[in-house]
């Protein structure tokens, strides 16, 4: 039913209000009637509950939550990486990100046992033309991986990395795929040799970090101190790479480890620059702030009426901000939303497995490779609990238009499918303790469309990054 305006609303005020709604929210859908409510008092006395109206006024709570979602602030500092904001590290990290020479398929080493593995770079899976993901349900570049490739947009705002949080810093996360046999299948000695063999990489590295290990040095017995390829393989001491690693002296292993970690820290410095640009939603929030402070409304529509209704659903009845909070639209934590069961009944342990891996990793924020190991890093307080089974990290909702398909296993091809799942909860199977947080929303078709319109407003059109020259 079309709401009626209060009796005190005059024609002049009514006309001004319609103009404000059109400017901030765009015109109503074709065939729909504009919804008009009371005009706000003069700007000097405008309250937070009456500045923006569509069907009914924004409440103080809606306004507060919507304003908290924009803009995206600069990334927080990372004391565990002293080079995190060094422009030289950013430049080196950018080149390394696009360099297939770090992989086992590059022909520079990496005796992974995976015949015919193609050379890969970080960008092979985190493709800048595909929202820093790869556009596939799960990673599948010759070797199928069980999880969707997460975007790198705004990753510097995270305190846990990957779907299960197995890394607690961006630099530690960057190291994992380099040596994972199912990802880049490299090894740390070959990677250091690749840096040493490339004059540009070597010069950039040594200007920033100091000398690389003396890879051609020989011991007192005349044997080479550094093998062609080597890395620790904790679960298989018979692996040739592990045997070569174990044959090195502790001091030489430490030299290689330090250089390897610095590769990760350069990669992390580059990834800190991957900050989402201003999206339509951000311009709408900026316009809302401007109008509330006494400024003029924009002359052109910013968001559609459907997207604004979706925004109000998002912060209101949908309660989406319980998990998708803040300007990155993620609380950065882990939740069991009922999708840990995969094809054939396979269970992905999610956060539980991630904590096991993190506690065993030498590359945590409190380990010797951290530049602030004495800090009160969250990893110090981690404990394994059964309810962590099937929990996955809340993904960012920014740039969603570029990062389909969705969820940790890529099971939903469209945003409409995602919203419908949360509306109906059909097929959800929660593994951990029963939760009352997620209940069916029973949205109708129009409400689902409104939420999708809002989610689409979180994406900006971006010019894909390309490899620079160093």
Image: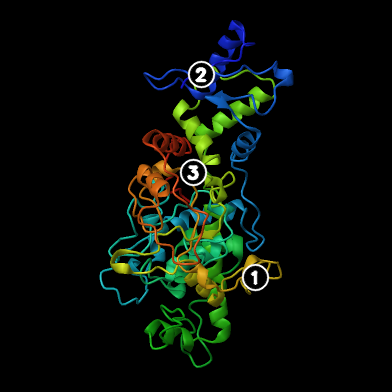
Q: CA distance from mark 1 to mark 2?
A: 50 Å
Please give the residue where the numbered disc 3 appears in the rendered image.
398
Q: Residue 433: x, y in percent?
A: 50, 66
Out of 389 and 456, give the one closest to the viewer. 389
Please give the residue where the numbered disc 2 appears in the rendered image.
22
Determine whether the residue tagged by mark 2 lies in a helix, strand or loop. Answer: helix
Kindly indicate the quadrant of the structure image that contains residue 427. Answer: bottom left
Kindly indicate the quadrant of the structure image that contains residue 415. Answer: top left
Query: Which residue sits at x=56%, y=74%?
Result: 384
Q: Residue 151: x, y in percent?
A: 45, 52
Q: Residue 85: x, y in percent?
A: 62, 53
Q: Identify the disc placed on residue 348.
A: none
- Single out the residue that lies furthest toward the right: 44
Label 1 vs 2, first from the N-terminus:
2
Q: For the residues carrying marks 1 and 3, which lies nearer the camera in this image?
A: 1
- The answer to whether any part of residue 349 appears in the image is yes
Vertical arrangement, residue 49 with respect to residue 17, above or below: below
Q: CA distance from mark 1 to mark 3?
A: 29 Å
Out of 194 and 130, give the one closest to the viewer. 130
Q: CA distance from mark 2 to mark 3?
A: 25 Å
Please give the residue where the numbered disc 1 appears in the rendered image.
381
Left or right, 239 with respect to 246, comes to left
């Amino acid at each position: 039913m079309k709401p009626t305006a209060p009796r005190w609303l005059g024609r002049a005020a009514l006309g001004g209000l319609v103009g404000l709604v059109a400017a901030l929210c765009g015109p109503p859908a074709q065939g729909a009637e504009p919804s008009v409510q009371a005009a706000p008092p003069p700007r000097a006395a405008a309250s937070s509950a009456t500045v923006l109206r569509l069907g009914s006024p924004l409440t103080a709570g809606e306004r507060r939550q919507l304003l908290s979602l924009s803009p995206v602030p600069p990334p927080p500092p990372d004391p565990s990486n002293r080079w995190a904001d060094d422009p030289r590290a950013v430049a080196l990290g950018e080149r390394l990100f696009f360099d297939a020479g770090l992989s086992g398929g590059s022909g520079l080493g990496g005796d992974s046992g995976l015949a015919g593995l193609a050379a890969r770079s970080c960008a092979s899976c985190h493709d800048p033309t595909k929202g820093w993901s790869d556009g596939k349900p799960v990673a599948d570049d010759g070797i199928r991986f069980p999880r969707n490739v997460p975007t790198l947009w705004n990753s510097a705002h995270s305190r846990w990395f990957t779907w299960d949080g197995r890394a607690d810093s961006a630099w530690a996360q960057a190291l994992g795929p380099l040596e994972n046999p199912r990802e880049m299948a490299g090894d740390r000695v070959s990677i250091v040799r690749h840096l040493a063999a490339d004059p540009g990489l070597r010069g950039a590295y040594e200007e920033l970090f100091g000398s690389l290990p003396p890879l051609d040095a020989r011991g007192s017995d005349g044997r080479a101190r550094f093998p062609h390829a080597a890395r620790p393989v904790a679960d298989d001491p018979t692996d040739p790479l592990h045997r070569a690693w174990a044959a090195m002296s502790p001091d030489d292993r430490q030299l290689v480890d330090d250089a390897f970690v610095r590769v990760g820290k350069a990669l992390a410095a580059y990834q800190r620059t991957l900050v989402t640009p201003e999206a339509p939603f951000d311009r709408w929030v900026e316009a809302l702030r401007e109008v509330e402070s006494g400024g003029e409304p924009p002359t052109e529509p910013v968001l559609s009426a459907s997207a604004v209704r979706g925004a109000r659903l998002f912060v209101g009845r949908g309660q989406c901000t319980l998990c998708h909070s803040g300007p990155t639209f993620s609380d950065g934590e882990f939740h069991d939303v009922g999708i840990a069961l995969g094809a054939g009944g396979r269970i992905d342990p999610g956060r539980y497995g991630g904590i096991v891996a993190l506690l065993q990793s030498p590359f945590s924020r409190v380990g010797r490779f951290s530049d602030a190991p004495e800090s009160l890093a969250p990893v110090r307080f981690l404990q394994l609990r059964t309810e962590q089974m099937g929990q996955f990290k809340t993904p960012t909702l920014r740039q969603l238009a570029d990062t389909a398909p969705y969820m940790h296993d890529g099971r939903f091809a469209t945003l409409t499918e995602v919203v419908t799942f949360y509306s109906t909860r059909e097929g959800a199977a929660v593994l951990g303790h029963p939760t009352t947080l997620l209940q069916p929303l029973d949205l109708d078709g129009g409400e689902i469309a409104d939420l999708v319109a809002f989610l689409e407003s979180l994406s900006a059109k971006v010019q894909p990054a390309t490899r620079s020259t160093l």
